[in-house]
């Protein structure tokens, strides 16, 4: 039986950066498509009024995705605003009053995790958690212990099935396409194992730096910011077994099992880097040891992936902004071929951004008498002009009670367990020049067989 749809949306941190860049554009898109017909209540402590919040929403939409006047007007007609301190019981009394007859509110905690307990307790005291759902943002903790503590805190007030931990990568259309491509094509799935695949590598490159978010980055670093969550979730989607059905729990079961099988990292599995000039950024300590680049090698301890290394590199001030995965096949030993040692790789390439690409690198014979090949790439390029953005998809799913694209507690804790031993600067920090591929050590000491794939080397075909 389908879960009952939420009948009100309350977002804490309504005047913050996340609401400005993601939540307002997602809400407008949901309204425009007719998928959001409920009261919308923003909550923050900014000294604002409703008109100021509406102006903030309009500015957000003009800068992030485009203003649709009709949808914006409908959004504003449903919008309310409560300005109050989260430590003040009166704030939650106002929320309860604003909810009116709503019985199944959806709360979005776009606030620091340190405030989760305060807000949950405040809602509980006004009878605001019964039949409610709650969305929480990353970072979900700073390490395994803090993630476990947060899970315990939230489950005091909400059952696990009502907690929606956002990792927006799971809501990306290209990530969903990757899963579909794997399981819809028998020829792919039949070769998706250690007998055929030599290595897997994922690159998440950002050409820009910390973009004025030095203070935040000092508390996070590349491993906490994108590896523990985004990159490990992509690994889970690449490597998991086929779900037993279409239910969201079946998908989360398989992602969870895969992450449980990922071996805990050691210092030998990690190279950390920091771009030259980072310590001069506002909010950054002059002697900062925080990494802006990380290269890591993951191992999955199960039958399918035994002996196959999964490499990840992620960083800022790199040559391009792009995210893609490359699954490289083993080189066949075929006596009939004359080019066995030429190093021509067969691979699948999945680009998640800025374009959406599914490609296969193959070898074809050069004209002539010898059995010598040359590389080619077969590209399937698919990008809809009105493609649903991750936050729109995820907010809609949460309102419907569909948790398939959200991280469950076991997956979050498994991911923290994997990276926990290499946090807190336990490995050396290597400086690298902006607009390069990180420190030399990432190539010399921690690179796939055949080297790192360069996302700038092959541009997507139109």
Image (tube, rainbow, N blue to C red):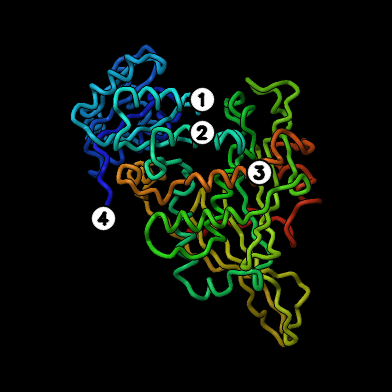
Task: Verify CB contact (< 8 Å) between mark 4 and mark 1.
Answer: no
Residue reaching furthest to the top: 47
Figure quadrant of the N terminus: bottom left
CA gap, disc 4 and disc 1: 36 Å
| Image coords of residue 161 (percent x, y) | 38, 45
Neighbour class for label 1 at 10 Å: few (<14), some, many (≥20)?
few
Q: Earlier in the sequence, mark 2 or mark 4?
A: 4
Which residue is disc 1 drawn over? 114
In the displayed structure image, the side of residue 360 where residue 425 appears, left or right? right
CA gap, disc 3 and disc 1: 21 Å
Q: Is residue 419 above or below residue 352?
A: above
Q: Quadrant of residue 279?
A: top right
Task: Verify CB contact (< 8 Å) between mark 2 and mark 4.
Answer: no
Q: Is residue 390 visible?
A: yes
Q: Is residue 31 visible?
A: no
Q: Quadrant of residue 332?
A: bottom right
Q: Is residue 58 above or below residue 226?
A: above
The secondary element bearing badge 1 is classed as helix
CA gap, disc 1 and disc 2: 9 Å
The secondary element bearing badge 2 is classed as helix
Which residue is disc 2 drawn over? 150
The secondary element bearing badge 3 is classed as helix
Q: Residue at x 62, y 28 (%)?
A: 219
Q: 306 and 174: which one is in front?
A: 306
Which residue is disc 4 drawn over? 1
Q: Residue at x 74, y 31 (%)?
A: 276
Q: Earlier in the sequence, mark 2 or mark 3?
A: 2
CA gap, disc 3 and disc 4: 38 Å
Which residue is disc 3 drawn over? 419
Q: Residue at x 28, y 49 (%)?
A: 3
Q: 304 and 189: which one is in front?
A: 304
């Amino acid at each position: 039986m389908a879960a009952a749809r939420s009948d009100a949306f309350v977002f804490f941190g309504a005047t913050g950066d996340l609401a400005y860049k993601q939540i307002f554009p997602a809400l407008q898109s949901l309204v425009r498509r007719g998928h959001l017909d409920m009261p919308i209540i923003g909550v923050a402590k900014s000294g604002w009024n409703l008109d100021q919040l509406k102006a903030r929403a309009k500015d957000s939409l003009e800068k992030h995705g485009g203003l649709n006047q009709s949808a914006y007007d409908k959004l504003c007609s449903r919008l309310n605003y409560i300005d109050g301190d989260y430590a003040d019981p009166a704030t939650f009394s106002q929320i309860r009053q604003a909810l009116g007859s709503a019985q199944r509110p959806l709360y979005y905690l776009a606030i620091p995790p340190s405030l989760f307990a305060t807000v949950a307790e405040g809602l509980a005291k006004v009878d605001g958690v019964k039949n409610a759902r709650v969305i929480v943002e990353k970072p979900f903790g700073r390490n395994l212990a803090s993630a476990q503590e947060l899970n315990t805190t939230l489950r005091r007030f909400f059952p696990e099935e009502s907690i929606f931990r956002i990792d927006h990568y799971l809501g990306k259309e290209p990530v969903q396409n990757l899963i579909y491509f794997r399981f819809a094509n028998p020829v792919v799935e039949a070769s998706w194992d250690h007998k055929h695949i030599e290595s897997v590598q994922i690159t998440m490159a950002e050409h820009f730096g910390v973009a004025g978010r030095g203070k935040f980055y000092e508390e996070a670093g590349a491993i906490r910011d994108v590896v523990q969550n985004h990159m490990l979730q992509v690994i889970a989607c690449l490597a998991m077994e086929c779900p037993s059905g279409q239910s969201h729990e079946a998908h989360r079961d398989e992602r969870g099992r895969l992450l449980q099988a990922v071996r805990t990292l050691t210092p030998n599995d990690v190279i950390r880097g920091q771009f030259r000039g980072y310590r001069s950024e506002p909010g950054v300590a002059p002697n900062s040891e925080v990494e802006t680049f990380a290269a890591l090698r993951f191992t999955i301890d199960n039958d399918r992936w035994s002996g196959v290394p999964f490499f990840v590199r992620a960083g800022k001030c790199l040559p391009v902004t792009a995210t893609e995965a490359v699954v490289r096949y083993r080189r066949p030993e075929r006596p009939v071929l004359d080019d066995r040692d030429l190093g021509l790789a067969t691979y699948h390439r999945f680009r998640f951004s800025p374009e959406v690409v599914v490609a296969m690198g193959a070898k074809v014979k050069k004209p002539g008498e010898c059995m010598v090949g040359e590389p080619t790439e077969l590209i399937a390029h698919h990008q809809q002009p009105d493609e649903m953005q991750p936050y729109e998809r995820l907010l809609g799913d949460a309102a419907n009670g569909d948790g398939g694209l959200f991280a469950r507690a076991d997956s979050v804790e498994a991911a923290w367990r994997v990276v926990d031993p290499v946090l807190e600067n336990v490995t050396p920090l290597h400086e690298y020049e902006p607009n390069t591929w990180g420190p030399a050590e990432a190539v010399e000491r921690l690179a796939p067989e055949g080297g790192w794939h360069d996302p700038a080397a092959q541009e997507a075909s139109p």
